[in-house]
Image: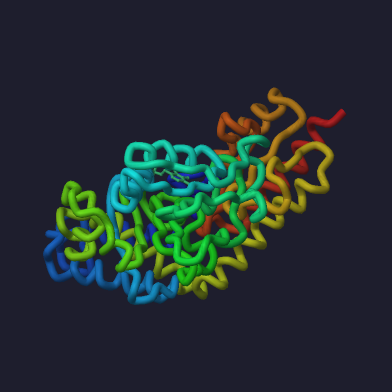
Amino acid sequence: MNDRIYNFSAGPATLPAPALKRVQQAVWSYEDSGIGVLEHSHRSRPISTLFEETEAALRRIARIPDDFAVLFLQGGASSQFFMVPMNLLQQDATADYLDTGSWSQKAIKEAKHFGTAHVAASSTDKNYSYIPAPEAIRYSPNPAYIHYTSNNTIFGTEWADVPAAPEGVPVICDASSDILSRPLDLSRLDLVYAGAQKNLGPAGLTLVLVRRDLAASAKRELPTMLQYRTHIEHGSRYNTPPVFALCVLREVLRWMEDRGGLAAIAEQNRTKAQLLYDYLDQSRFFRATARPDSRSRMNVCFRAPSETLESRFVKEAERAGLSGLKGHRSVGGMRASIYNAFPPAGCERLVAFMRQFVRDHSN
Ligand code: PMP
């Protein structure tokens, strides 16, 4: 392990070491078949088993009920921005969007190609530093669905819970940056999607959990590849699927189960984030940018007293083996992304580094 450094990248992000080790072997010879996982036919027995086992592990870990389909798609979460309204929003209908940052905005932009997108609440007035209160949400009279972004990767805010929605209206969640970081309440959700490159595995795989009856109610006059029902009917293997990405996901899920599943992982995520926020809150040098009640457990955004000090911080941290701490330009400063696989010891190292930085740069 000592040839690796702490990687705070927002995504693609650090993956569990045991999973990476097992994948290395699978690339050479998958389950002792003499053929690497990149070289097996996606119709072969070992790969069919890989798909079945990965889905079963996901269902166990996230308690996904049978009335939800589990789909392994491609095109990133960005393709779900259009696939959702393409399937579920009629031209004369309105979908309601909760706007909590750049990714919500991108989803809203795509919805407008297919129908009306109503912004039911937004935190743009304070540079997306908070999650709107329930009282601030104004849903339209008869929305086709409600869409929200559970964790705002760029701004470092996160919904503590699924937003309250009118009875019977489907709730759709972009969970790209906090999927499987805590238990998932699918009794209140109808479609959840996530690019894999933060908590699940490699970029190139997009996980979609969709209530089967919602997918069945979708429009039919669409290109085959862009209908959810195609992928449900073909077990995510209508065309050649991202087999390698599934192999990595399978190993990441194995690691999650070994660690005690979502409850244990959620607890560790809470502790890791708390360590950083507690330090930032008592510091008179650094300051966390997100409002305390809206803070993300995955992306911790913070500023130093000047931009000069911030760029020095990022450079010196990199030299100290703490990589990827530069914040997104729309917030500035620093961002520590600490997804599931990011080790607690890395958070401790970051706090120690911040303490030293303050000593070195205060006058
Ligand atoms: N939604 C969120 C919340 C994200 O963080 C990202 C990527 N960082 C996306 C959507 C876009 O994902 P992709 O690159 O997989 O299209």
- How many marks do you count on the picture? 0
Q: Give whichever of 302, 134 is nearer the camera.
A: 134
Image quarter in which the C terminus is found: top right
Which quarter of the frame holds ligand 1?
Answer: top left
Q: Position of residue 186 (x, y in %)?
A: 46, 69
Q: Position of residue 317 (x, y in %)?
A: 63, 37
Give the residue displayed 36% in from the left and 73% down from the top: 57
Res 318 quadrant in image: top right
Q: Give whichever of 96, 270 is nearer the camera.
A: 96
Give the residue displayed 63% in from the left and 31% down from the top: 332
- 211 to the left or right of 3: left
Q: Is residue 158 visible?
A: yes
Q: Give whichever of 41, 236 is nearer the camera.
A: 236
Res 320 quadrant in image: top right
**Where 54 falls versus 4 (above or below)?**
below
Res 190 quadrant in image: bottom left
The colour scheme used to paint the residues is: rainbow
- 191 to the left or right of 177: left
Q: Give whichever of 128, 206 is nearer the camera.
A: 128
Give the residue displayed 55% in from the left and 46% down from the top: 120
- 272 to the left or right of 143: right
Q: Position of residue 203 (x, y in %)?
A: 35, 47
Give the residue displayed 57% in from the left and 52% down from the top: 298
Q: Is residue 76 visible?
A: no
Furthest residue in direction top, as rendered: 308
Q: Position of residue 210 (x, y in %)?
A: 35, 63
